[in-house]
Image: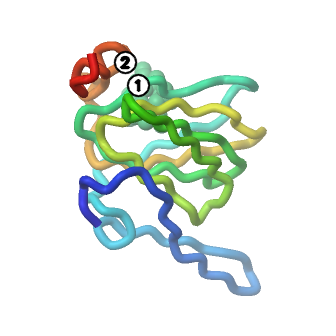
Amino acid sequence: MEETAGPHLIEFRHIIDPRGALTPIEAERDVPFPIRRVYFIYDVCHGAVRAGHSHKALQQILIAVSGSFTVHLDDGRTRQSFLLSRPNIGLYVPRMFWRDIDNFSGGAVCLALASDHYEESDYYRDYEAFLRAKGLR
Ligand code: T46
C-alpha cells in the first residue's frame, strides 16, 4: 500500500472459535507503515469532540476496539465521515488530513496505531495554518 493512498477502511483478520474472536495486526503486513507508537482513548465524556488537528507527517490507523465513534477527515477541500464500530476494521488516516472525532458511544475505546513517536511539532492545531500549508489560502 502506498503512503500516498487516501483515507480508507482496512479489514483485519477476524479469527473466531468457540471461545470468541481474535484480531491480529502486524506492522508493514496489515498496516502500510512500521508502528512506532500505540495509544488509546477511553472514558470519553458524553458529547466530547476529540482531535481537531492535522499531522504534517504522521500516518495512523484508528480502530473502535470497543463501542463506536465517527471520524471526520478533511483535506481542505472535501470532508469525509467514517463511523467506526467494529474491532476488526481500521481507518487509515494519511498525513495532512484535518480530523475531528465525535459521536462516541458509551464505553468506546479508540485504539491508534501511529507511524512515529509523539512530537508536538508535527501538529497543525490551527485550521487556517493547515490550509496555508496545503496552499489553499
Ligand atoms: C489523533 C487523535 C485520534 C502524549 O503525551 N502522547 C501521545 O502519544 C498523544 C497522542 C498525546 N499526548 C498528550 C498531548 C496532550 O497533552 O496527551 C494530551 C492529549 O492529546 P491530544 O489533545 O492531542 O488528544 P486528541 O484525542 O485530541 O488527539 C489524539 C492524537 O493527538 C492525534 O494524533 O489523531 O488522537
Q: In the current view of this chain or complex, which residue is farthest to the bottom?
A: 17
Q: Which quadrant: the N terminus? A: bottom left
Q: 57 or 118: nearer the eye?
A: 57
**Callout 2: 10 Å neighbours few (<14), some, many (20+)?**
some
**Image quadrant assignment for residue 108:** top right
Q: Residues within 10 Å of mark 1 (few under 14, many from 20)?
A: some
From what the image shows, is residue 101 above or below residue 121? Answer: below
| Mark 2 secondary-structure assignment | loop
Earlier-in-chain disc, 2 versus 1? 1
Per the image, the residue denoted by label 2 is 125
Q: Residue at x 66, y 42 (%)?
A: 69
In the image, is the residue at mark 1 within 8 Å of ligand 1 by its beta carbon? Answer: yes
Q: How is the image coloured?
A: rainbow
Q: Quadrant of the C terminus?
A: top left
Q: Seen in the image, is 56 located left or right of residue 97?
A: left
Residue drawn at x 25%, y 18% is 132
Q: Which mark is residue 53?
A: 1
**Percent x, y for residue 24?**
49, 72
Position above or below: 5 against 120: below
Residue 60 image point, x, y percent: 38, 47
Measured Cα–Cα span from mark 2 to mark 1: 5 Å
> Residue 33, located in which quarter of the rendered image?
bottom left
- Mark 2 touching mark 1, by CB under 8 A? yes
Please tell me how many numbered marks the rendered image carries. 2
